[in-house]
Image: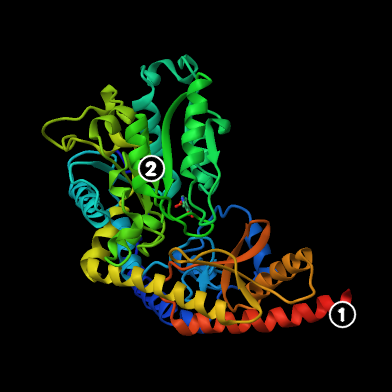
């Protein structure tokens, strides 16, 4: 008689023990979120904690409980800080408790949303429909959830390049272009758009960076001139990238003017609205991004200003056929059936780079159902109101100076002290920012505006309160004074 071989599985031998651990984890994590305000916004990792990450590959099992204990001791205490109420660095959202739970449900089903006939794809379809409704984009447009704004820009700009090439660029490649192709955006455009143009094989120089005006919006006259010059020089302009919320200051290009220009010039109009596109969901802010709905393609994030857990962004493309033509490739092993598991056309893999795709739609679906769109409309307005509140506090303080208009949810400022040189002020403010972070007070990030070092607060935080901005201003002034005194003493 044949013996039955020992067959391994990674499911637990003792489900009850894992269930008990899982309950513990859920309890601990909810408490972790509930008490986040009591912890520092950020803390540096001590060397001994860092060193614990150089252990060799564990060949033998340590058990889920031991792994969880290590996570609690070595990982959990040293976060980036973005779930904290006083994190305003770069543009990074906070996430929500419902989002956490949805991630667990998504991982339990563990579907692949590349294609096929199953409910998870219906969830994503519905979420994309809701995204269109939220940002006022045409219902017949196509769309795709992606990893974030960078991928959303890459997908949109790929469709633009292919649709505007005038020949079969997928078959013949960029080398067959009869003339050099060019895109246009302001100098304020996000690096992800520059990377996208590089990845499209056009080269960084193909993205013409047009000067911005004092409000950090694209200079429309300079844009028209650059397009005309390029045409005269034998180039083929193919598209303009409008910014709905620049990363530096939150400035919004005149999107209606860009849409008009693109119509006139026969160019593709792509909008990078990574966070700014979501301003459209708050009735009081919608006029700021008027014209965005006219874009041929629109990129935005849900893990920034919709507070979804990482990662989730969205690309919408007005012309479904152009979108599909840019990505669809169906070998025999991926054939789309009309019945059975392989049905469910159209497949999402026909609209983007990824074949295997996670269930990122579920956290969006559950969050919108749990909280309702109205809550998001209010939260986004609240973040902008808080940014305006911070702007006023900065403007009222004799030692703080605002360095850019507060167009949306971003405030850029610095500490100033008469008698200090520009270099001294740059150094002082760089040190001030580090001390705010190292002392666990708050996490803004930095940028450079018109040559000046700026402390930059980007508010996509669903936990911030006005008192947090009061504290930031108080502490910026206190640390700034100390640093100014030290600089004066040293000079
Ligand atoms: C304006 C803008 N575009 C694109 C991106 C890239 O988005 P992601 O980080 O989600 O890839 C960002 C990120 O901050 C951004 O601010």
**Crowd tier of the residue under label 2, counting other residues whose Cα lies within 10 Å: few below 14, some 14–19, many 20 or above:** many
Q: Residue furthest left?
A: 339
**Which numbered disc, 1 or 2, marks the residue closer to the eye?**
2
Q: Nearer the viewer, residue 444 or 362?
A: 444
Q: Which residue is mark 2?
A: 258
Q: Report the residue at 29% width, 38% height from top.
A: 2
Q: Which residue is mark 1?
A: 489
**Where on the picture, by quarter, is residue 395?**
bottom right
Q: Report the residue at 53% width, 61% height from top.
A: 90
Q: Position of residue 231 (x, y in %)?
A: 48, 23
Task: Give SS at disc 2.
Answer: helix
Q: Is residue 347 left or right of residue 313?
A: left
Cβ of mark 2 under 8 Å from ligand 1: the answer is no
- In the rendered image, the quadrant that contains the C terminus is bottom right
Task: Give SS at disc 1.
Answer: helix
Q: Nearer the viewer, residue 293 or 78?
A: 293
- In the rendered image, the quadrant that contains the N terminus is top left
Q: Report the residue at 50% width, 21% height from top.
A: 232
Residue 11 visible = no
C-alpha distance separating marks 1 and 2:
52 Å
Q: Position of residue 38 (x, y in %)?
A: 50, 84
Residue 443 visible = yes
**Crowd tier of the residue under label 1, counting other residues whose Cα lies within 10 Å: few below 14, some 14–19, many 20 or above:** few
Question: Is residue 357 shown above or below 332?
Answer: below
Q: Is residue 483 left or right of residue 473?
A: right
Question: Is residue 108 shown above or below 66?
Answer: above
Which disc number belongs to residue 239? none
Q: Position of residue 307 (x, y in %)?
A: 37, 65
Q: Are marks 1 and 2 in contact (CB under 8 Å)?
A: no
Q: Nearer the viewer, residue 107 or 405?
A: 405
């Amino acid at each position: 008689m044949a013996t039955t071989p020992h067959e391994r599985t990674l499911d637990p031998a003792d489900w009850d023990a894992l269930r008990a651990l899982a309950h513990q984890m859920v309890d601990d994590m909810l408490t972790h979120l509930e008490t986040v305000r009591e912890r520092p916004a950020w803390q540096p990792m001590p060397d001994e904690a860092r060193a614990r990450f150089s252990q060799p590959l564990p060949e033998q099992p340590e058990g889920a409980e031991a792994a969880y204990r290590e996570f609690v001791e070595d990982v959990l205490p040293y976060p980036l800080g973005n779930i904290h109420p006083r994190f305003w660095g770069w543009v990074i959202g906070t996430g929500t408790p419902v989002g956490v739970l949805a991630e667990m449900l998504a991982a339990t089903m563990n579907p692949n949303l590349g294609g096929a006939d199953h409910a998870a794809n219906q969830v994503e379809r519905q979420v994309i429909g809701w995204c269109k409704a939220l940002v006022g984009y045409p219902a017949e447009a196509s769309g795709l959830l992606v990893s974030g704004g960078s991928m959303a820009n890459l997908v949109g700009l790929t469709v633009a390049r292919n649709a505007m090439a005038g020949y079969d660029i997928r078959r013949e490649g960029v080398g067959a272009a009869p003339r050099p192709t060019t895109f246009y955006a302001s100098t304020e455009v996000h690096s992800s758009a520059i990377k996208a143009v590089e990845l499209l094989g056009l080269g960084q120089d193909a993205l013409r960076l047009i000067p911005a005006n004092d409000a950090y919006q694209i200079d429309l006259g300079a844009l028209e001139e650059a397009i005309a010059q390029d045409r005269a020089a034998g180039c083929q302009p193919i598209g303009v990238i409008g910014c709905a919320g620049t990363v530096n200051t939150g400035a919004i290009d005149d999107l209606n003017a860009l849409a008009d220009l693109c119509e006139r010039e026969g160019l593709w109009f792509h909008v990078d609205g990574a966070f700014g596109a979501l301003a459209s969901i708050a009735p009081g802010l919608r006029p700021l991004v008027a014209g965005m709905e006219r874009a041929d393609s629109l990129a935005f994030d849900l893990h920034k200003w919709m507070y979804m857990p990482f990662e989730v962004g969205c690309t919408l493309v007005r012309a479904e056929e152009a979108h599909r033509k840019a990505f669809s490739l169906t070998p025999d092993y991926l054939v789309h059936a009309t019945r059975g598991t392989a049905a469910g056309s159209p497949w999402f893999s026909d609209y983007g780079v990824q074949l295997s795709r996670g269930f990122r739609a579920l956290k969006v679906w559950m969050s919108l159902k749990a909280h309702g769109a109205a809550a998001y409309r209010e939260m986004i307005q609240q973040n902008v109101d808080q940014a305006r509140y911070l702007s006023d506090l900065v403007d009222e303080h004799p030692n703080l100076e605002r360095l850019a208009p507060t167009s949306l949810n971003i405030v850029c400022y610095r500490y100033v002290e008469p008698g200090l040189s520009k270099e001294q002020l740059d150094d002082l403010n760089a040190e001030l920012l580090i001390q705010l972070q190292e002392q666990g007070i708050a996490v803004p990030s930095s940028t450079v505006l018109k040559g000046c070092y700026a402390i930059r607060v980007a508010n996509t935080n669903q936990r911030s309160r006005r008192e947090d901005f009061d504290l930031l201003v108080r502490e910026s002034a206190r640390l700034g004074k100390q640093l100014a005194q030290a600089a004066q003493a040293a000079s």
